[in-house]
Each structure stands twice: as C-alpha cells, then as structure tokens.
Image: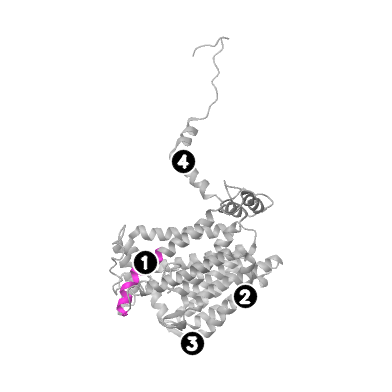
Amino acid sequence: MPASRTGRPPVRRAGRPAAAGVLRDNPVRRLYLRARKAWDRPLTAYYLILGGSLLITVLGLVMVYSASQITALQLSLPGSYFFRKQFLAALIGGVLLFAASRMPVKLHRALAYPILAGAVFMMVLVQVPGIGLSVNGNQNWISLGGSFQIQPSEFGKLALVLWGADLLARKQDKRLLTQWKHMLVPLVPAAFMLLGLIMLGGDMGTAIILTAILFGLLWLAGAPTRLFVGVLSVALAIGFLLIRTSPNRMSRLACIGATEPGPNDTCWQAVHGIYALASGGLFGSGLGASVEKWGQLPEAHTDFIFAITGEELGLAGTLSVLALFAALGYAGIRVAGRTEDPFVRYAAGGVTTWITAQAVINIGAVLGLLPIAGVPLPLFSYGGSALLPTMFAIGLLIAFAREDPAARAALAMRQPRFGRKRGAVRESARAAGPRRWNTMRRRASAARSSGER
C-alpha cells in the first residue's frame, strides 16, 4: 500500500457494506418495497373493497349467464332468463351500495332498528299460510308477484350486523361491556329469536351464517374466553340436535369427501361438483363449455356455481375468485382495526365475518371439505335476495373506509377541480386532516390516539 506524504499509511474510508448495495440494487427488493409502500397508502382499503366487490359481481354475472342457460332451456324459458333477473338485482344492488357508501355513520345507526323490525316482520310472514312459499323443502320465501320472490332471512344478516353493532357501541360508551350480562343481553336472545324464525323454515345454512356473525360481534366486543366457550357450546349442542334429528342433514354430513354418488345417489351433487372441478384443469375447458351444467350438477348457477367456474375457467379462475375474497376480507379487517369509532369497528367486523364465513362454507362444500349447507357464494351466485343486502353491506364498508381521516384527506385532494376553486379544494383537504401519503400508521395525534393494533 503506498505511503502518504506524512509517511503514514492512507486511512480507508468507511463505506456501506457490499450487501447493502446488493439489496438496494436488487429489483425484487425494490419491487417488494414499492408494493409495501402502495399497500400502506390511505386509500388501499377503500379501493380493495370497491374494486374487489365490483370484480366479484361482474364475474358472477358472467358465470350466472354461462351456468344457467341449460337450466333455463330445460324449464322452457329463454336462455338469458336467470341472467336478466340477476342483472336487474345487480343494478338495484348498485344503487343500494352507492346510497350506503354516501350515508353518514349516524344514519346507518338510525337504520338499525327499522331494518331489524322489518326483517323480523317478514320472517314472521313467511310462516303464515298462503304468504310463505316452500322452495327445495325450506319455507323461507315470500312471493312478490310473477316470478319474483324474496327471502327475508337474508336481510336478517344485515339486521343483526347493524343492530348488534349499534347495541354494543352504546354499551361500550357507557362502559357496560365489562359485565357479562350486558354483553349477552339482549344481543344473544335477539340473535336466537332470529335463528328460531329461520329454523322454523328449515334453512340451517343461513342459521349457521347468523351464528358466525353473532360470535364475530362477541369476539370484537372482547367477550371472555369462558363466556365465549359457553355460548359456543350451547350453539353446538343445538346444532348437533338439529342435525341428528334430520335424515336430510345427516346425509349431507355423510357426503363430506365422497367420491361416489352412493346408494340412491345421496351424494350425487357433492360428487359431481368434484367432477366439475377435476375436469377443469389449469385453465378450464373454456367459458360456456361446461359439461356438468347439462343436467348432471344440480343448482349449477346457485350453490355450486364455484364448481362450474372451476370447470370452465380452471384453477386460474377459482384462484382468482379466492384472491378477490381474500382481498375483500383483508380490507374489512383493516377498516375494523384502524378506527376509533366502536360502531364502525363492530359493523365492519360483522360484515367481514358474514361475507368470509359464507364464502368459506360455500366453497368448502363444493370442495367436499364441508357439508352442503345450501348457502350462495356472496356477490357471485344467482339470487337477488342474497345479492341486495350483501351489496348494501359492501356499501357500509366503503363508507367506513372513507371515514378514516387519512382517507378523507386523500379523497379531498383527488376531487375534480372543474367548477371549483383550487383554494376550496385545499381548504377541504386541510379540514379533513393532514395529508399522509406514505403510510396509514403515521397519523396526526389529533386525528387518532391509539387506532393501530
């Protein structure tokens, strides 16, 4: 090493390790950091809920049209009959979604009791002779005239979410949730009343979803483990009794993992659902080219539409649907976890529990991992009665995502400026809160104190 002018060896300058330079120049690392930064932006949950729900609905319309054509022709109806009805329900649901997304939180809370009263009234009407209709052995329908029917139990899910969230929020404001009687009463008795009205019609699938919503609300309210286990034990005991006393439900339980139709074709639907998924391969047989929908697979456009999706769009199509539901569930959890408003937390958690639990039960039944419960795939399967309250619930999540201070500021900065002065835009953004683009975790202390969990 050459000596310096002073005769001393030159001092080596400290520099960054070579590994740091490699990590900085690594394209995979840069892509990861960029994706993580985008994932933490204030509007991530808003766009995930809005985009994910719309994509699921649009893809569901396409699959309903494809899966229902043969069934419609077998009933001497036009091939697009079920698609037209579903499209009309989607348009009405879109109006409900937009209205719910623009409503303030106070109005949502004000609607809790009217929606609960209306749902209970309609579920009572179902049991009145001459008004209630029986479909596939379950009396849970009311005729609206012509070919239009409504299933009131689907609106019972929305009613329990809104009313339960408002009830728990008011009790939390009064510091009453530390007492077990205030946590259970009247939430659990009211939920059991809804479950009883649903089970009078024999619809155990909807009852399971309602039970999942109840436990989701109790979990969000911080129910003690003993209390949670106690209520769960009672629900499991009642469910076991209802299954044990019904030969139809016992046969569905026996079809879990079945590979043959069995005696008297008891597991025909479950097995042919597996056949449809197995024949789809990686990219499917092509849109509209399903074989199982030609009378082999019952309820191809409703409960088993996921099987037809796997047959026509393959593994790629089914994984896309699963990814959309996973993104929707993540966004709902993110909204519930990053708010200081207890009503928003309970309502967002209840809606997320409802949609994810119903999707898991439906897809699990199609895959042969769970018994067939007869519940549709949310936003995807045919059925206007299920689509309308679900889209209203999605509108709730969008409204809650917009209520976040950082999201309000970001939306205010992105408002169109035509017809408005730029100063007015800046003033609205300043009133909404500080602008934070990098991450939702860095908030002004005035906006929130401990929203991060």
Distance from label 4 to label 2 (Cα)? 51 Å
Q: What's the amino acid at mark 1? A: Met
Q: Which residue is mark 2?
A: 113
Magenta region: which residues?
Answer: 59-76
Distance from label 3 to label 1 (Cα)? 32 Å
Q: Position of residue 371 (x, y in %)?
A: 41, 72
Q: Which residue is mark 4?
A: 29
Q: 297 and 101: which one is in front? A: 101
Q: 91 and 318: which one is in front? A: 91
As drawn, is 431 to the left or to the right of 28? Answer: right
Task: State the residue lying farthest toward the right.
Answer: 174
Q: Could you tell me which quadrant the C terminus lies in?
A: bottom right
Say whether residue 67 is magenta: yes
User: Helix or strand or loop: what does disc 3 sit on?
Assistant: loop
Which of discs 4 and 2 lies nearer the camera? The answer is 2
Colour logic: one colour
Say whether residue 342 is magenta: no
Counting residues from the start of the chain, the first of labels 4 and 1 encountered is 4
Counting residues from the start of the chain, the first of labels 4 and 3 encountered is 4
Which of discs 4 and 1 lies nearer the camera? The answer is 1
Tag 1–tag 2 contact (CB < 8 Å): no
Tag 3–tag 1 contact (CB < 8 Å): no
Task: State the residue lying farthest toward the bottom.
Answer: 129
Q: Which residue is mark 1?
A: 63
Q: Which residue is mark 3?
A: 131
Q: What predominant SS class does the magenta segment belong to?
A: helix
Tag 4–tag 1 contact (CB < 8 Å): no
